[in-house]
Each structure stands twice: as C-alpha cells, then as structure tokens.
Amino acid sequence: MALSSDGSGPAEPAIAEANAEVVRRLPFEDTRDLADARRGFLGTASENLIKDADGRTVWDLDAYGFLDQECPPTANPSLWRQSRLCSEHGLFEVTEGIYQVRGFDLSNMTIVEGERGILVVDPLLCAETAAAALALYRAHRGDRPVTGVLYTHSHADHFGGVRGVLTEEDVAAGVPVLAPHGFLAHAVSENVYAGTAMNRRAAYMYGAALPKGARGQIGAGLGQTTATGAVGLIPPTVDITRTGQSEVVDGIRMVFQLTPGTEAPAELNIHFPDRAALCMAENATHNLHNLLTLRGAEVRDPRVWARYLTEAADLFGPASEVAFASHHWPVWGTERVTEYLSEQRDLYAYLHDQTLRMLNQGLTGPEIAERMELPPALERAWHTHGYYGSASHNSKAVYQRYLGWFDGNPGHLWQHPPVEAARRYVEFMGGAAEVLRRARESYDAGDFRWVAEVVNHVVFADPANAEARALQADALEQLGYGAENGTWRNFYLMGALELRHGSVGTPTSTVAPDLLAVLTLDQLFDTLAIRVDGPRAWDADITVRWNITDGDPVTMRLRNGVLTHGRSVPSSPPDAEIALPEADLRALLLGTLTPAELASRPGVTLTGEASALTRLLSHLTEPDPDFAIVTP
C-alpha cells in the first residue's frame, strides 16, 4: 500500500470499482450546472490568500485547484463533480442589479444595487472573507456604500462576517439590518448553549483541518469548507414578522416569506419584484439538505419545509425569472425555477412521508435508512443528491423527530455505555487479537463498513491498541473515499486523521464575543447553569442577590445541584447581596472579571458573606473544545 506523507493510502479495489460504477450510473453528460455555475462571471480576486490582521491565512482561493483534474479512485465522482462546481470563485452577475460573490467561504454573499448604494444579503461567516468579497464587488462595480444588510437566517455562515461590510457607526447613522423574527434568540442559543460541542463536531463535518487533495478534503457539499477568521454579529434593527411583509431599502423593493422551522428555526425567502428574482436563502439549494446536521442541532421539520417550498412556488414562481440561494449557483428561466422548487419540495415530502409509512409498519430508524430510495425522477436530478444531507441520516432524523432515540426494543432500553460495551464485546468475540484477525479478513473482502463497526469496539476497549487504531483509520478512510456526501467523507477522513495523529481541536468557533455580547441576562445566567457540576454541588445551598443599579434585581441560588435565577425576593436573607452596574455583572458572568476584581470596582458594594460568590462559582466547569470523538 503506497502511503502519503500524512499516512493516507490509495483506494482499495472495492471502493475504486464502486466509484467507477457511479460514473456509469449517473448522467455526467448533463453539464447545465457547470454552465450555470460560470454564468455571469466578472472576475475574481488578484490575491489568492485571504488573511487576518495577524497575517494568518483564513481562506485560500486556490486550495481546490486540484479539482480541475480527472476524478481519482479516492473520491466519489458525484461528490467530485459537486465540489468542482462549488469551487468556482469570483463575482457573478445574477441578473441586472443583483450580484453574488461565490467561493470565498462556505456560503455566498449576495449584493443588490440600490439607488445610492448596496444591500448586502448574508455577509459570509468571517469578517475577513466578507471584506474581501465586498472589495471584489467594488473593484468591478464601483465603491458604492453599504446601505443595508439582510440576514436570511440564524446560522453563523450567514451573519458572522458582518463586521467586514458594516460598522456600529453605520448602523447608528441609520443603515438598517434586517432579519427574520426570532433571529437573535436562535443565533445565540444554537451557537452558545451547545456551541462547544457543535464546533468540535463541525471540525469533523467540514474537515477544515484535513489536507486539501484527492485523498483528503475536497468539499462539504453545501460549499467547500468554513473560513477560519473572526466571527461577529451586529444585531438586527428591522424585524420581518410575516409572510407578505414588504420593505424598501435604498429603493430596493422586497417581499418576504417567513419559513420558520425549515433549514433554520428563523429563516425567510425574499422576492425582488422589480428584478423578477427570488432568493431562497438555504431552503432550496443544489443538494439534499440536512434534517439533522451531523454537527448537531434541533431536528428540522421536512413536512413544514415541503409546504413552504410549495408556498414559495405559488407566491413567487410565476413572477421569477431567476432563483438563487445563499449557497451554490442560480437557476434561470421561470419554467426551470418552478421545476426546481417542485423537485426540492418533493424531495423533503417524500423523505417525510415514506419514513412515517415505514415507522408505522414497525421499522426502526436504521432499518428505514437502509430501505429508503428516492424515486428515479428525483435521483436523475443532480440537485437532489445527498452531498450535504443524505437520505440515510435524514430518514433517521425524521424517526427521531417523531419517536425519539428509543426504537421500542427493550433490549436497547438500558445498554452499556460505549467503553463498557466495547470491553464486553471484545471479550465475547475472543479478544482483541481475534477480532482484528477477522476484521482484516473483512477489510480484504472490501467490507469496510463492518470493519469500522467491529474495530471501533477494540479501539474503545483499548485506545492504546496501535494495530486497532491503524486498521480503524484505514477502514474509515476507504468509507470516506466512497462517500457521495461531503460531510460523511469529512467525518470519515477526520476520524482517520485523529486516530493516526491525535486531536486537531476546533479550527473554527462560533462562540464569538459579539454573540456573547447580545445574550440577555437571563441567557447569561442559563449559560452558567449548564456548567454546574451537579454531583459536586448536591450539598451546596448558596444564594446571591444582585441589586443591579441600572436594572431590575436578580436572585441566583444554587441548590440540589441546580442553579436557578429569578426576580422575586428570596424568602430568607441571601448569603451575599451585591449592588453593581449591569456591565460589571455581565463581565463577571462572562468570566472577564473575577470576584476579587469585582469587589474593588467603583460603585460595587457587598453585604453578607464575602466568599459566597467565590464558593458558588467554584462549582462551575469549563467546556472542553478538544473532547475525543473516535476514541474514548
């Protein structure tokens, strides 16, 4: 086996043949997507590397140049094709007065020209890539000011780069920031409450730490990967609360469709009636999307998603000559737009309905996933393929949405946790040496899926077993080489990478200062509550009363391992009572101010037990951004 410098190997014959069969099975002669992805190209940046203020590269425009080559056996040709399309980068004209910068981040930035300046829709994930995208637009269209910003939904790759195109001073001067109702609450809850775990898993999902190349990261299906620059947030100033709401920004007329519970809990589509253009946000893209993203999130509702796609087609389809989204490339022509939206609608409706049909016949999530097949007409449409979501994990998500984690089999009700189960399995199977011997036979037979399942037990029973780690890495690598889904490939290859070389940590974090700054006090107290080490705090009973000099008082109590807060006056005197400005309380709760520093701040007074606050905070734990995934 010829290994590369990072330890990766070639495709085994079974994977190479499976990938060759993809070419024979799918309509690669249909090149309309390539023409659409290049249509309206005006140019790209002269500098390939986008860097932050410290000179660190956050995005490399040439990183995916290798995709111009013929697809090798180490990649699924369908995913290679998708990644090639997503790697087209530059400024593109969508229609008169509407432009997109694509390939500068995971998502697209859309720019709509107004009477005096421009409306920026979805300013990418990071300030550095957003600034570079805006500079590219201005290089071709002139130095027009930003006269409005619009966030289509509450995921960070659609608002995180806002400080690259807008300042607080611009907003204070009257530049509006529009967003769907509920945007701020969902942007914060998704990226902060479970942010550490999501960001660590996102390292696997997007594969930002993987080497780019035919044996490594080639894309994520929805886009190439996530930029690694500064994530920010400027809160919206205009709330879009209903479908049919119309707003005019800098002479740009927009009619909105609210689509909560689809791709994001707060999301909207936009029709530009004067341009006959429809922005579908992330509700209709050139792939099957996630109903439950592999990094983790709330399960999305495909029934509602399908209904909103029907509504979009009915409301705006006949009046739209182009449909574009915040990922991928546009679709032109009213007939094609209608067909595209209808097929996307049928995709989510089919997955929902067929999963429900099978679960009501008694099938479990994994059983449904194995049986789920898309209708031939949908399979022939490139934009329905599972490059980002998949029919397999989406059908499991539908099952989870309706029935939860338990499949009804009492044998699965109280299973051992992974390490304990692994030790027992390995012992039952004759010990590690015998498991690995038989697993190598399965590997040689091309049964990599089974190898990954079985050898995982050996790794969890004995993570120091070098032979098991190496075989598991090899099996995961082969599964990655055969995956059509970009995020599956990245998960498999990241697993192989970390088994061989150790944890890479979290390359990109959305738990950014701007998001923390817009947390309400209630949300800040909640972020402390989820960090309490419950068992260690069982016997603690500590009450602190915060008398906020520029706000309402709050009582915080740790009891029974639970940290609660409320506005009511405690029934008995608190252990400590602290008067302070809200800014100081925020700094303390965010960890930028210690209790000792707080006590010395001007305007802060404390009565009662001085050590109460320190004792309470001692029961908090810190999240681990580098926790293990493929090992215990």
Image: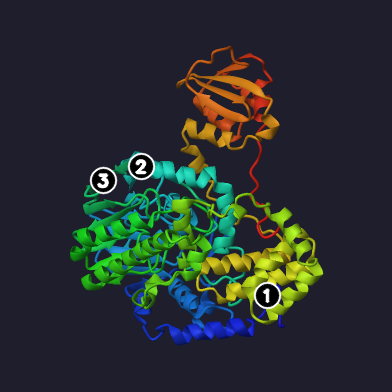
Q: Secondary structure at mark 2?
A: helix
Q: Nearer the viewer, mark 1 or mark 2?
A: 1
> Residue 199: x, y in percent?
56, 53
- Give the vertical position of 30 relative to 524 (above or below): below
Q: Secondary structure at mark 1?
A: loop
Q: Residues within 10 Å of mark 3 (few under 14, many from 20)?
A: some
Residue in the foreground of this view, choosing between 425 and 538 = 425
The type of residue carrying mark 1 is Ser
Distance from Cα at disc 1 to Cα at disc 2: 49 Å
- Write down the residue under mark 1: 8
Q: Which colour scheme appears in the figure? A: rainbow
For the N terminus, give its image quadrant: bottom right
Residue in the foreground of this view, choosing between 483 and 282 = 483
- Write down the residue under mark 3: 242
Find residue 528 and report its image quarter.
top right
Q: Residue at x 42, y 62 (%)?
A: 355
Q: Residues within 10 Å of mark 1 (few under 14, many from 20)?
A: many
Residue 227 in view: yes
- Write down the residue under mark 2: 171
Residue in the foreground of this view, choosing between 46 and 90 = 90
Is residue 425 rendered to the left or right of residue 91?
right
Q: Nearer the viewer, mark 3 or mark 2?
A: 3
Q: Earlier in the sequence, mark 1 or mark 2?
A: 1
Q: Residue at x 47, y 50 (%)?
A: 298
